[in-house]
């Protein structure tokens, strides 16, 4: 279902055409209201009971689990995508001379941990370049079939951060299971805008920052650990992820056991009374819109925007090779240094990554935004 413009849910000025959700999404008016309330809690600490360190974060865990078809027990609350990848890197132990599969020019937060793992283990990084036809799924599957069980693990995104080129993770998941390859995913640039189910992919770990397509605040992120990995080691030892931590009077009765499931991976101070309620409000809004509806709605905007850039001489990555939400428009010549500045002078906001103009609309955009972009492009 195509959603009508949801601009009324945001405090966005009418003269702003924001096409940069891949950079950061704006928060809704409802999130602002929840944030005002939750931030003021610190002024009234006597109203916070020990149970409050657990109840709101458990609600957040459950809402996120619904988004990916998982159980609340599978979810940890972390401060960043890189924190989740650090957990994965700590527990995945590739053998010497095995391969760690990555995409060429993948976002660095999903490369640096594996550089360290390779250095420590003697494994080798195996980068898959972007093919000329943008069939990244085919390129990844070909590399897996060629190397087979030489690959110990694959660390991948769902969609390329710079231009939206997609990887069919269900197909990759099947290939990984065939050869016993462990799979760690960074879904920061897709989750919330594109449907995803752990049941289809069966990854070992997932990480996703909240502040992009999940509409959440900064310094909130989510981590999924498959049930088979929930006895792995966390990267920090804090009081709240141990069994019995609900009993504040008994905290000095030190415990070897952790809380059940993926809770052992939670960051310290996970309760985060100011931000956790905002993050939950954001996820509830996404579930209310429906991720399938979000994807269909954004796809319509992307088609209209792609035609504007095509008429301006840009190459548009084909729709069947990229996500509906994130599109790269490639310039044949170097872009003018003031390209973004000129667009912003006309109220249009997007990003440039290399030669690619990165375009990322959302459900708050409408026909007036598309018209504003078309007018702005005539001034370049």
Image (tube, rainbow, N blue to C red):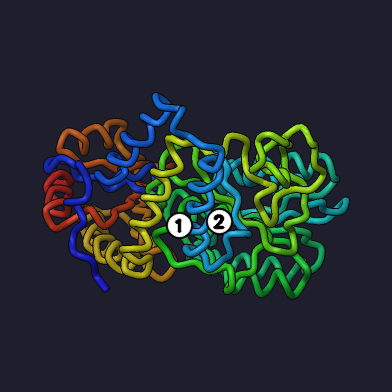
Is residue 355 among the parts visible in the rendering? no
**Residue 365 image position (x, y, % from top left):** 21, 54
Say which residue label 1 marks. 190
Image location of residue 351, percent across then percent down: 34, 42
Count of numbered badges drawn on the protein:
2
Along the viewing direction, whichever of 198 and 177 lies nearer the viewer:
198
Residue 301 locus on image (x, y percent): 24, 61
Please tell me whether mark 2 sits on a helix, a strand or a loop.
Answer: strand
Tell which residue pokes out farthest to the right in this image: 96
* Residue to which mark 2 is pinned: 157
Question: Does residue 297 sit above or below 376 in this rendering?
Answer: below
- In which quadrant of the rendered image does the N terminus lie? bottom left
Q: Local crowd at mark 1 within 10 Å, few (<14), some, or many (≥20)?
A: many
Give x and y (percent) for residue 380: 19, 40
The structure residue drawn at horizontal position 49% and vertical position 66%, both measured from the top left corner, is 196
Q: Which residue is at the far front? A: 249
């Amino acid at each position: 279902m195509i959603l009508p413009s949801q601009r009324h849910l945001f405090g966005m000025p009418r003269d702003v055409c924001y096409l940069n959700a891949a950079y950061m999404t704006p928060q809704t008016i409802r999130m602002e209201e929840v944030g005002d309330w939750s931030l003021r809690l610190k002024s009234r600490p006597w109203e916070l009971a020990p149970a409050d360190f657990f109840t709101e974060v458990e609600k957040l865990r459950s809402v996120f689990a619904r988004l990916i078809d998982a159980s609340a027990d599978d979810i940890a609350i972390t401060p960043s995508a890189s924190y989740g990848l650090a957990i994965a890197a700590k527990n995945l132990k590739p053998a010497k001379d095995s391969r760690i599969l990555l995409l060429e020019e993948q976002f660095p937060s999903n490369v640096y941990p594996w550089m360290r793992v390779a250095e420590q283990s003697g494994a080798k990084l195996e980068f898959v370049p972007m093919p000329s036809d943008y069939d990244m799924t085919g390129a990844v599957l070909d590399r897996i079939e060629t190397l087979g069980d030489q690959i110990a693990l694959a660390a991948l995104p769902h969609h390329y951060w710079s231009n939206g080129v997609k990887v069919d993770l269900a197909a990759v998941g099947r290939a990984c299971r065939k050869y016993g390859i462990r799979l760690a995913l960074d879904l920061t640039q897709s989750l919330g805008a594109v449907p995803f189910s752990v049941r289809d992919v069966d990854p070992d770990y997932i990480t996703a920052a909240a502040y992009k397509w999940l509409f959440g605040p900064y310094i909130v992120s989510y981590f999924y650990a498959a049930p088979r990995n929930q006895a792995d080691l966390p990267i920090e030892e804090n009081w709240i992820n141990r069994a019995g931590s609900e009993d504040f009077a008994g905290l000095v009765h030190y415990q070897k056991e952790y809380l059940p499931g993926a809770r052992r991976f939670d960051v310290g101070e996970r309760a985060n009374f100011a931000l956790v309620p905002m993050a939950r409000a954001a996820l509830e809004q996404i579930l209310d819109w429906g991720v399938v509806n979000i994807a269909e709605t954004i796809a319509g905007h992307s088609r209209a925007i792609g035609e504007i850039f095509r008429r301006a001489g840009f190459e548009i990555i084909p729709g069947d090779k990229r996500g509906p939400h994130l599109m790269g428009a490639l310039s044949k010549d170097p872009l003018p240094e003031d390209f973004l500045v000129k667009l912003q002078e006309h109220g249009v906001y997007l990003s440039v990554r290399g030669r690619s103009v990165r375009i990322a609309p959302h459900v708050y955009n409408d026909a007036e935004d598309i018209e504003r972009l078309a007018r702005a492009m005539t001034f370049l």
